[in-house]
Image (tube, coloured by chain):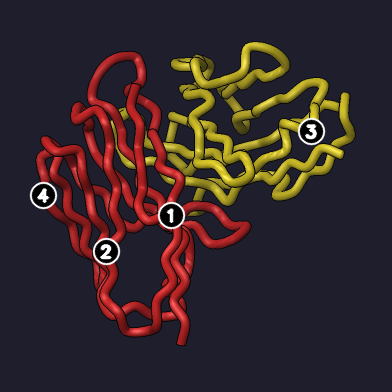
Chain colours: A red, B yellow
Amino acid sequence: KQEVTQIPAALSVPEGENLVLNCSFTDSAIYNLQWFRQDPGKGLTSLLLIQSSQREQTSGRLNASLDKSSGRSTLYIAASQPGDSATYLCAVRPNRGSTLGRLYFGRGTQLTVWP
Amino acid sequence: NAGVMQNPRHLVRRRGQEARLRCSPMKGHSHVYWYRQLPEEGLKFMVYLQKENIIDESGMPKERFSAEFPKEGPSILRIQQVVRGDSAAYFCASSPAADRHEQYFGPGTRLTVT
């Protein structure tokens, strides 16, 4: 069974720092990996999607990398801002079996960026 | 193109009542997924549906929970005889015809059972 772990669970940093959020998964047979942002009481906003054949994706100040063989992904946030404060979720989609449709989520990293 | 719509956004039910949660997928999307987020926990898959078909319901509790996605109208997640432990945020996602596309999430329905 696929398990997704995110480290750290919480992170509090001053504005301007560069950050690395970590995600690991136990089954490397994935189709893709997604990073989401969740604001308190709100839904999920997709940030980046990396296909299993890709090594990284970039969007603005965000860069996500994927090492499928070792079961790891990192989300890099450059020059953090208070508006980046949210919970960041990592989710993987399996590549086989009867569970093709579902995403497996980690518990998230709660990020606070203070001015 | 409107995103995934869910209603109601907030729902309060007393123990023993029924809860109906609705999800309208994005236009052109025929695949719908329901997830539940319990307090202090991650999102857990519940059920995956296509129009008029349940593809995978292995994440759904065996009793009191049911889901449908009719030919016309929204997908509905139904919880009968709610209990306090059902209090959670329920998220719906949709994707286009092929089941390997990115999933787009709605804003969620927050169910509170008193």
Q: Position of residue B38 (x, y in %)?
A: 62, 39
Q: Earlier in the sequence, mark 1 or mark 2?
A: 1
Q: Which mark, by number, is residue A55?
A: 4
Under circle 1, the secondary element is: loop
Residue matched to label 2: A20
User: Gap in Å between the C-alphas at discs 4 and 3?
Assistant: 43 Å
- Whole-percent x, y for residue A88 in the image: 41, 57
Structural distance between the alpha carbons of marks 4 and 1: 24 Å
Pointers 1 and 2 in contact (C-beta within 8 Å):
no
**Which residue is disc 1 drawn over?**
A9
Same chain, labels 4 and 1: yes
State whether discs 2 and 4 lie on one chain: yes
Residue B84 - label = 3
User: Which numbered disc, 1 or 2, marks the residue closer to the eye?
Assistant: 1
* Cα distance between the residues tagged 1 and 2: 12 Å
Q: In the shown orientation, is residue B21 left or right of residue A52? A: right
For the point 35% across and 37% down, the residue is A4
- In this rendering, position of residue B74 left or right of residue A93: right
Q: Amino acid at mark 3?
A: Arg
For label 3, the SS is helix
Category of crowding for the residue at label 1, using alpha-carbon neighbours closer than 10 angstroms: few (below 14), some (14–19), many (at least 20): some
Dot 4: what SS? loop
**Place of residue B108 in the rendered image (x, y in percent of width and height, measured from the top left):** 61, 46
Badges 3 and 2, same chain: no
Amino acid at dot 1: Ala
The residue mark sitting in front, 2 or 4, is 2
Residue ID at (79%, 33%): B84
- Say what amino acid the circle numbered 2 marks: Val
Q: Which kind of residue does numbered mark 4 sit on?
A: Arg
The chain holding disc 1 is A
